Amino acid sequence: MESVAASTRCADASATLSDCHFDLPPELIAQVPAERRDHARLLVLDRSSGEPTHTHVHALAEHLHPGDLLVVNDTKVIPARLFGRTASGGGVELLLVRALTSAGAQGASDGASWLCLGKPAKRLRVGTAINLPDEQCATITAVHGNGHYTIAFADAATVQGLIARHGEIPLPPYIRRPDGPLPLDRTRYQTVFADVPGAIAAPTAGLHFTAELLAVLQRKGVGIARLTLHVGPGTFLPVRSEDVSKHVMAAEWCDIPATTAERIRTVKASGGRVVAVGTTTTRALESAASEGDSVASGPRWADRFIVPGHEFRIVDALFTNFHLPGSTLLLLVSAFAGQARILSTYAEAIRLGYRFYSYGDAMLIQ
């Protein structure tokens, strides 16, 4: 197997896209999840020493402390991929990103207008009508560039039923499903705490947790708190600028309950750690950081693009998956643990055959 060529540069705000590259053997891209969620492998990285420990997710409690607070993202993936045809018979694929209010924001909506990704672009322009299952019809009302469109459904009242009956779980392209998602994807591409519909991708670090594991953690004295961040395409759009600070990352809607914000303040005051489950949870918390160790509660747009040089104010430890080279997610974990250290750890993971990406193995960085 090829190994990662680790960068020798220090992690700082001047990091470039080239610094975030590594070579991953394609056979290490996980195509199905571990047979049991918490039986995936777990690499525990000590940031102070750089030493890795190799274990499994079901042993996570051994590496957390009484008084720690595990913060999870309870967003739920919607079957947001729809297939239709234009009046001339050409096939169209739509990925519904979010319902829009009259102001184009997340929140109360009549469900008629949606922001979406659509292809092929040559068939989609303002005024294009798309015939969908159940005799539903949608019309392109705006073109935003980079494959983004606004569509209006002719019958808003039937949209949710249309999605439920005919929508497809939008798996990432590196999970190869030439005939469409497998039956297992309907359940395994959701976390056990998925509760608030609205994401077009799973917060994949959370896929490793089971009710049994959460119970073990709570018996040890580790608290569990929730927030919601609806994962959108901004998380996964590739960074194309060599100067990563010039990349514009789309904001994602999130909501941090007042109870979660209060528990974070209490844990911080008592010397405990905030352990974020996933980069989406991390982004929500760091975007909502306010004075001291406080987090602002309530709905907001998470707009923090976390790159090397970021000063983490809320998150003390991070449970996460192994990420794509050159991605915003890899930049975030590099910011948390140091770019050279992450790349050298990834090299070790590749050497030992860890499985990468959404259905792959996990890391705990502390």
Image (cartoon, rainbow, N blue to C red):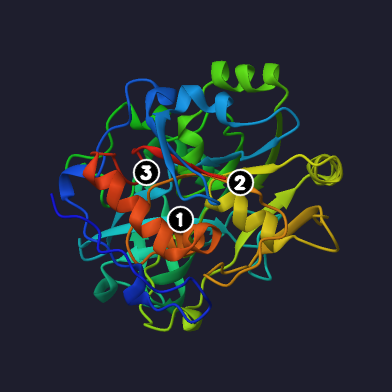
Q: Residues within 10 Å of mark 2 (few under 14, many from 20)?
A: many
Which mark identifies residue 202?
none
SS of the residue at dot 3?
A: loop
Q: Is residue 150 above or below residue 210?
A: below
Q: Is residue 26 above or below residue 127?
A: above
Mark whose residue sits in front, 3 or 2: 2
Q: Is residue 308 above or below residue 138?
A: below
Q: Nearer the viewer, residue 271 or 238?
A: 271
Q: For the residue marked with disc 2, what is the amino acid?
A: Ala
Q: Specify whether residue 109 is in view.
A: no
Q: Nearer the viewer, residue 165 or 4?
A: 4
Q: Residues within 10 Å of mark 1 (few under 14, many from 20)?
A: many
Which residue in the protein does label 1 denote?
96
Image spot of residue 136 (x, y percent): 42, 50
Which residue in the protein does label 2 denote?
317
The quarter of the displayed image where residue 21 is located: bottom left
Image spot of residue 184 (x, y percent): 33, 26
Q: Specify whether residue 326 is in view.
A: yes
Residue 146 appears left or right of 286: left
How far is mark 1 from mark 3, CA to CA? 20 Å
Q: For the residue marked with disc 3, what is the amino acid?
A: Ser
How far is mark 1 from mark 2, CA to CA? 33 Å
Q: At 68% from the left edge and 60% from the top edge, which residue is drawn?
A: 286
How far is mark 3 from mark 2, CA to CA? 20 Å
Which residue in the protein does label 3 denote?
358
Q: At 58% from the left edge and 25% from the top edge, which residue is drawn?
A: 61
Q: Earlier in the sequence, mark 1 or mark 3?
A: 1
SS of the residue at dot 1?
A: strand
Answer yes or no: do the residues labelled 1 and 3 have beta carbons within 8 Å? no
